[in-house]
Amino acid sequence: MLLPRQFYARDVLIVAKDLLNCYLVREYNGHLLIGKIVETEAYHQNDPACHAYRGKTKRNEVMFGPPGHAYVYFTYGMHYCFNVVTGAIGRAEAVLIRALEPVKGIDIIKTLRGGKSERELLSGPAKLTQGLAIDLKLNGHDLTGGKILYITKGEPVAEEDIVVTTRIGINAGKDLPYRFYLKNNKYVSKK
DNA sequence: CCGGTGATGCCCT
DNA sequence: GGGCATCACCGGT
């Protein structure tokens, strides 16, 4: 089932947790590339680590728009990261998708990633954008349209199978418990 | 297995 | 001009 707009129009911490076990689907050159979401992080406008903490800019303006759209940004001179916009219009919130478990189209994904081992294909925020061919052309894309790039519902996750901890790769806001991942899943990114 | 480090370009101050 | 929501590779163990 395609996730509807109201799924995304909730608090970013709820959405970040509920996205676990859902499927990110990418239509690429006639192939379906699919990964199961196993790790997420939440960011919001009152959080010092958030791109929108100091207000709206050209880069982060998608975060202030309607929920259910993709916020893609470029970083470290060579990598892209993929986020899902949440919450109400005018409020800047987004969930960073940090890791996927490969599900479908694995041969294509392997080619896009330069022939890495299955464990290394999508187990990091910039790895999964490379493996699913996500770049700035998809910034602002509506994920509720069911085309090109979208998310479908997964099996519910038991509360005890979710680990809540601090985020990775940031300094500001590093003590906030805004990272969520599936316990014992080998495709979660490493620290 | 582990920690350290260079790559590389754009955004924002 | 500094810093970045990262990754892959290198060398020592």
Image (cartoon, coloured by chain):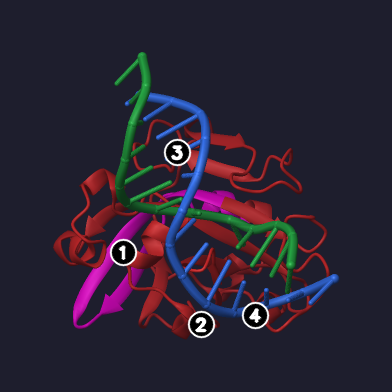
Chain colours: A red, B blue, C green
Q: Residue at x 43, y 76 (%)?
A: A135
Q: Is residue A116 magenta?
A: no
Question: What is the three-letter code of the residue carrying label 3?
Answer: Lys
Q: For mark 1, what is the residue?
A: A131
Separation of marks 3 and 1 at Cα, in angstroms: 17 Å
Residue A125 left/right relative to A127: right
Separation of marks 4 and 1 at Cα, in angstroms: 23 Å
Question: What is the three-letter code of the residue carrying label 1?
Answer: Gly
Q: For mark 3, what is the residue?
A: A190
**Which circle's residue, 3 or 1, is located before the other in the chain?**
1
Q: Which mark is residue A146?
A: none
- The x, y position of residue A162, in whole percent, is 51, 36
Separation of marks 4 and 2 at Cα, in angstroms: 11 Å
The residue carrying pointer 1 sits among few (fewer than 14), some (14 to 19) or many (20 or more) residues within 10 Å by Cα, namely many
Separation of marks 2 and 3 at Cα, in angstroms: 30 Å
**Which circle's residue, 4 or 2, is located before the other in the chain?**
4
Disc 2 is placed on an element classified as loop
Q: For mark 4, what is the residue?
A: A62
- The x, y position of residue A72, in whole percent, is 53, 73
**Which circle's residue, 2 or 3, is located before the other in the chain?**
2
Disc 3 is placed on an element classified as loop
Q: Is residue A31 magenta?
A: yes
Chain bearing tag 4 is A
State yes or no: discs 3 and 1 in contact (Cβ < 8 Å). Answer: no
